[in-house]
Image (cartoon, helix red, strand yellow):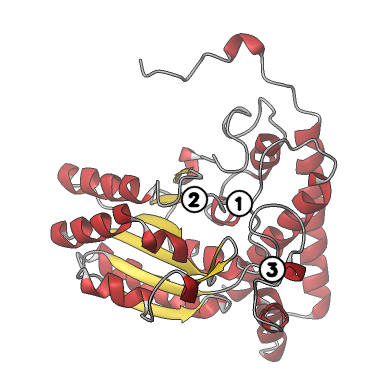
Amino acid sequence: MLLQQYRSLYRIRRVEEVIAAHYREQQMRCPVHLSIGQEAVAVGVCTQLHREDALFSGHRAHAHYLAKGGDLQALFAELYGKATGCCSGRGGSMHLIDLAVGFWGATPIVAGTVPLAVGVALAWQLQGRSGVSAVFIGDGAMEEGVVHESLNYAAQQQLAVLFICENNGYAVYTRLAGRQPPRQIHALAAAHGLTVAVADGNDVELVSQHSAAAVAAMRQGGGPQFLELTTHRWLEHCGPDDDDHLGYRQPGELAAWRERCPLALAAERLQVRDAVSEATLVQLRQQVEDEIAAALEAAQNAPEPDGCERLEHLYGE
């Protein structure tokens, strides 16, 4: 399991780094919010979800999309605005979807997908269907009223919704302490009646363990669950560059988080346990590099959208 998770961690990291490198060519004409440094949250949670479970995300969605099984070439193509993109080039980075693997969608509106995740869980409950509906949010989303309404309703109806809060400590450039009074985010969810857990979001095994417990409880009728996973993004809020020079972080804060790299932690554990050799890891990384290179080239060479189709998908049939 840890080897599979390491591969997913490495794959997401390299995809994001490739996006950052090519973004400067000005061919991806959409904003990008990268998850470099936060990969363990996506991988640890999605490891415990079934293909048919519903997953929602927000503006920082690449890692969630890939961890749930989203198509890599379709992701690249969407960033390039190509017809083969997962939204046919209409949505860009912040509007990803792949219903075939249970990725129900992402939106840049903060907390915009939270009530949608609750709605899916309610619909499935009314239909007598099993399955878990999960939604990723950031610490900033906890300041949106719709989140508290959704937490309350999910608890009242005992819906199988998993709320995952990636607490990276910042909303754009504002620290959590500058936006909220001294309190714990998970305590807010507990006050709404949810079962909560807190874990180091850079430790993929811990995230996986807590996610497994939460998902198992929901599948057994235990009602909604809330995970607060602490982590940190390494790059700027929006874009491919470093921004530590802006001074909004505490001195040394980014360096401390970089020392706790989720990939390095997972690789170290694999080697300490003698689970795999260094040669195996080198081979794994090369396979990932080859996959990314092929997907990127295919996306870059994909056809542009047909202008005649620009009015499709605007209204329901």
Judging by the rendered image, the residue that carries numbered circle 1 is 62
Mark-to-mark CA distance, 1 and 2: 10 Å
Question: Residue 31, relative to residue 8: is it above or below?
Answer: above
Between circles 1 and 3, the one closer to the viewer is: 3
Q: What is the x, y in percent for residue 266? A: 65, 79
Task: Please rate how many residues cluster around mark 1, counting C-alpha atoms within 10 Å: few if below 14, some from 14 to 19, many from 20.
Answer: many
Circle 1 — which element? helix
Q: Quadrant of the N terminus?
A: bottom right
Q: Nearer the viewer, residue 146 or 190?
A: 146
Q: Is residue 29 left or right of residue 70?
A: right
Circle 2 — which element? loop
Circle 3 — which element? loop
Quarter-of-image position of residue 240:
bottom right
Given the image, on which type of amino acid does mark 3 rest?
Trp
Q: Nearer the viewer, residue 245 or 141?
A: 245
Question: Residue 113, relative to residue 143: is it above or below?
Answer: above
Between circles 1 and 2, the one closer to the viewer is: 2
Q: Nearer the viewer, residue 109 or 286?
A: 109
Given the image, on which type of amino acid does mark 1 rest?
His
Residue 291 at least partly seen: no
Question: Residue 227, relative to residue 161: is it above or below?
Answer: below
Judging by the rendered image, the residue that carries numbered circle 2 is 58
Given the image, on which type of amino acid does mark 2 rest?
Gly
Count of all numbered marks drawn on residues in the image: 3
- Residue shown at the point (75%, 42%) measured from the top left: 295
- Residue shown at the point (37%, 19%) measured from the top left: 316
- Residue shown at the point (60%, 75%) measured from the top left: 2
Mark-to-mark CA distance, 3 and 2: 18 Å
Labelled disc at residue 234? 3
Q: What is the x, y in percent for residue 250? A: 65, 80
Mark-to-mark CA distance, 1 and 3: 15 Å
Q: Quadrant of the C terminus?
A: top left
